[in-house]
Image (cartoon, helix red, strand yellow):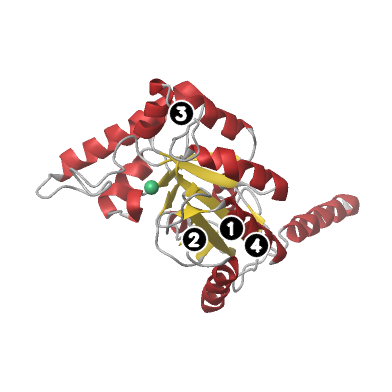
Amino acid sequence: MKKRLAIIFILLCISFTALGGVHNSSADTAQAKGRSVNLLVVMYHNILNCKNSIYIVSSRQLEEDLKALKQEGYTSVFPSEVIAFVKGKGTLPKKPIMITFDDGYYNNMYYALPILKKYNMKANLNVIGAFSEHSTNSGDHSDPSYSHITWTQLKELADSGYFEIGNHTYNMHKFKPRYGIMPKKAESELVYKQKLKKDVAHLQEILKENCGLTPNVFAYPFGRYSQMSKEVLLSMGFEMLLTCNEGINTITVGDLKCLHYMKRFNRNSRYTTDRLMCIIANSSKKQK
Ligand SMILES: [Zn+2]
């Protein structure tokens, strides 16, 4: 009996130690519920060396960012690891970061993948169905300056072990006839919800069929969302919803809602890696 109690005690100690840098809130002890960790998410789009803009970053800038983030002690995690943590089924490192790429550009594979491999960092890529379908079906693909990723390339990225794939709508990443996934003026709730569900489900089906993937991460086009869109997406099985609001996320075990309006810093190429790190450091200070 004493031996069994000793084993239980040792196992409890091991699980507690494994929680590492996760800081516990108030009276939380061995119980998982209530534990929180701050999560930084950085958002990239195009990785290109011939142009720059608030949505185009050079491969050199990306490499400098990843190097600096590593030096600051950040460890990249997949969305699935964050979701598992919230469900009490996993742990997160002391300073977790999620690196995300929106829109599914081929240059993410061409430029970002080798850099991620070099620094052994993980990322999330959120694909727009209609654009990838065009690349796949037209035969016009694999040009880093403008191509979107094909289904075969997307599967290759997912299989590489460096990317987890998210849904960025099949064909609602545009300003007309609605702004992203926002309802149209005078559109009924029923019609709106049906249209959103149909579009997003269509991409889910394509991803399942062509890549064997069923994403549970959704990135809101242009960062626009509503209560209705959240209801639709959650009813479809999505668990993590990414916005473009900037700030640090507090991720808490047992609180699924903390995953529904995830904040991300847009990496703007018009500033340096040092400035990005300052922005992150200042936001992190405010969060404490
Ligand atoms: Zn987008």
- Do residues under tags 3 and 1 come within 8 Å of each other at their CB atoms? no
Q: Earlier in the sequence, mark 1 or mark 4?
A: 1
Q: For residue 141, which numbered disc appears in the image? A: 3
Instruction: Provide the secondary structure element on which disc 3 rests.
Output: loop
* Residue found farthest to the front: 50
Any mark on residue 69, and which? 4
From the viewer's perspective, is 176 left or right of 13? left
- Nearest to the eye among marks 1 and 4: give it: 1
Q: Residue 114: give x, y in percent of width and height.
A: 66, 42
Please indicate, yes or no, whether residue 157 appears anywhere in the rendered image.
yes
| Residue depicted at x 77% and y 56% | 12
Name which quarter of the figure residue 280 lies in: bottom right
Callout 2 amino acid = Ser
Going by the numbered disc 4, the residue's amino acid type is Leu
Q: Nearer the viewer, residue 76 or 226?
A: 76
Q: Which residue is mark 2?
A: 269
Position in image of residue 1 (x %, y %): 87, 50
Q: Earlier in the sequence, mark 2 or mark 3?
A: 3
Which residue in the protein does label 1 denote? 61
| Distance CA(mark 1)–CA(mark 4) | 12 Å
Earlier sequence position, callout 3 versus callout 4: 4
Q: Disc 2 and disc 3: Cα gap in Å?
A: 25 Å
Query: Residue at horizontal 50%, vertical 43%?
Result: 125
- Which residue appears at 45% of the width and 21% of the height? 209
State how far apart marks 4 and 2 are (Cα): 16 Å
| Label 4 CB less than 8 angstroms from ligand 1 | no
